[in-house]
Image (cartoon, rainbow, N blue to C red):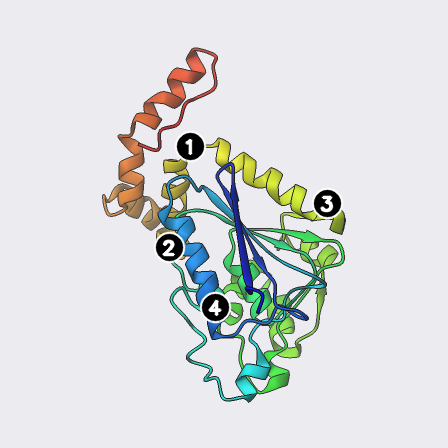
C-alpha cells in the first residue's frame, strides 16, 4: 500500500503531503504519520517551516468516516498532537503553512485552521459539516473559527455546515493568499522562503508569546511578556543572533543566523 503521508525536505522547508485517494481522509494511522512529520519539524534544527498540502481535488475530507463506521473510536483518532498530528500540538514552535489545494472539509478545515498561515487555490472550499453528521467540529473548529471570523459568520458555518469559497475566505482574512491551482505550491514555497530568511529564535519566541498572550488584555500581555516565564523569548533576547542582526545591518551585509 502506498504511504498515506509523503515528506520532502529542502532548504529548511519540510513539505508534508497527504495522499489517501480519493478524499485524503485521515484515520488513526494517518494521524500518527502526520504527527511524526510535525515532530520531525520540531526536532530537526535544519528545518524551519512546514508546508502541509494534499493530492487531487481534496486538501482533506477530515476524519475517515469509513474507518469510523468500521468501529474506529472517535477519541482514538486524536493521536499525539491532536487530529492530523497538529490540531493540539500546542508547543510546536516552528511555523506551518497550509497549502489548501482543494476541498477542506471537517477535520481538513480544522487542520488548515491549526496552521499559522493559509495559502489557498482559488478553487478551494472550506466547510465544517459535522452537525449534519450528528457530531461537533471539536478538533479546533468550534474553538478556532470564532477567533478567526466575525462571530455571526463563524456561527453560520458551524451551525449550517455550508461551504465557504476561497474568495470569501480571503474577504474575511481567513487566508493569506488565493492563487490559481497551478501556482499554489510556488506561492506557499515563496512564503516559506521568507520565513527561512528570518532568524529562527525570534520565530520560536513569536509563537510562544502569541500562545501565552492571545487571550489576555494588552496590559496583562505586557506583564506576561516581561515576567520571565517565556523561555524562548528570554533566550532570543540574549542570543548571538540578536547581536548579529543589528551588526549585519550596520555593515550592510546579509545576516548569518546561527540559531543561538
Q: Which mark is residue 31?
A: 4
Q: 15 or 118: nearer the eye?
A: 15
The answer to the question of whether label 2 and label 3 lie on touching residues, with beta carbons closer than 8 A, is no
Residue 238 falls in image quadrant: top left
Dot 2 or dot 4: first in sequence order is 4
- Report whether 238 appears left or right of 45: left
Residue located beneath label 2 in the image: 216
Q: Earlier in the sequence, mark 4 or mark 1?
A: 4
Which numbered dot is residue 183? 3
- Residue that mark 1 sits on: 199
Q: Residue at x 51, y 36 (%)?
A: 11
Left or right, 93 with reference to 2: left
Give the distance between the C-alpha atoms of the residues marked 3 and 1, in whole angstroms. 27 Å
- Place of residue 134 in the rendered image (x, y in percent of width and height, measured from the top left): 57, 87
User: Looking at the image, is mark 2 or mark 4 nearer the viewer?
Assistant: 4
> Of marks 1 and 2, which one's residue comes earlier in the chain?
1
Q: Secondary structure at mark 3?
A: helix
User: Where residue 38 sits in the image (x, y, percent)?
Assistant: 44, 55
Foreground: 43 or 216? 43
In three-dimensional space, the C-alpha distance between marks 4 and 1, rounded to whole angstroms, equals 30 Å
Residue 127 versus residue 149: which sits nearer the camera?
Answer: 127
Depicted 25 relative to depicted 112: above or below: below
Q: Quadrant of the C terminus?
A: top left
Most foreground residue, 104 or 147: 104
What separation in Å lies between label 2 and label 3 (alpha carbons)? 38 Å
Tell me whether the residue at label 3 lies in contact with that at label 1, contact meaning CB atoms closer than 8 angstroms.
no
Residue 217 in view, yes or no:
no
Residue most toward the left? 228
Amino acid at each position: 500500500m502506498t504511504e498515506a503521508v509523503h515528506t520532502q525536505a529542502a532548504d529548511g522547508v519540510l513539505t508534508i503531503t497527504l495522499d489517501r485517494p480519493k478524499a485524503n481522509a485521515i484515520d488513526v494511522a494517518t494521524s500518527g504519520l502526520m504527527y511524526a512529520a510535525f515532530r520531525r519539524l520540531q526536532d530537526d534544527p535544519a528545518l524551519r517551516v512546514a508546508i502541509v498540502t494534499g493530492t487531487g481535488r481534496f486538501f482533506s475530507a477530515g476524519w475517515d468516516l469509513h474507518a469510523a463506521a468500521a468501529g474506529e473510536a472517535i477519541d482514538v483518532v486524536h493521536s499525539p498532537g491532536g487530529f492530523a498530528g497538529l490540531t493540539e500540538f500546542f508547543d510546536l514552535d516552528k511555523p506551518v503553512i497550509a497549502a489548501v489545494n482543494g476541498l477542506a472539509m471537517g477535520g481538513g478545515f480544522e487542520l488548515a485552521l491549526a496552521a499559522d498561515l493559509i495559502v489557498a487555490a482559488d478553487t478551494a472550499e472550506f466547510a465544517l459539516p459535522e452537525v449534519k453528521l450528528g457530531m461537533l467540529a471539536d478538533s479546533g473548529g468550534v474553538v478556532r473559527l470564532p477567533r478567526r471570523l466575525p462571530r455571526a459568520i463563524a456561527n453560520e458555518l458551524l451551525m449550517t455546515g455550508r461551504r465557504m469559497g476561497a474568495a470569501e475566505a480571503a474577504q474575511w482574512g481567513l487566508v493569506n493568499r488565493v492563487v490559481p491551482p497551478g501556482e499554489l505550491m510556488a506561492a506557499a514555497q515563496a512564503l516559506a522562503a521568507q520565513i527561512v530568511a528570518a532568524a529562527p529564535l525570534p520565530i520560536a519566541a513569536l509563537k510562544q508569546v502569541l500562545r501565552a498572550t492571545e487571550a489576555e488584555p494588552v496590559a496583562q500581555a505586557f506583564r506576561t511578556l516581561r515576567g520571565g516565564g517565556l523561555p524562548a523569548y528570554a533566550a532570543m533576547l540574549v542570543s548571538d543572533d540578536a547581536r548579529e542582526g543589528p551588526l549585519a545591518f550596520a555593515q550592510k551585509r546579509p545576516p548569518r543566523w546561527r540559531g543561538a
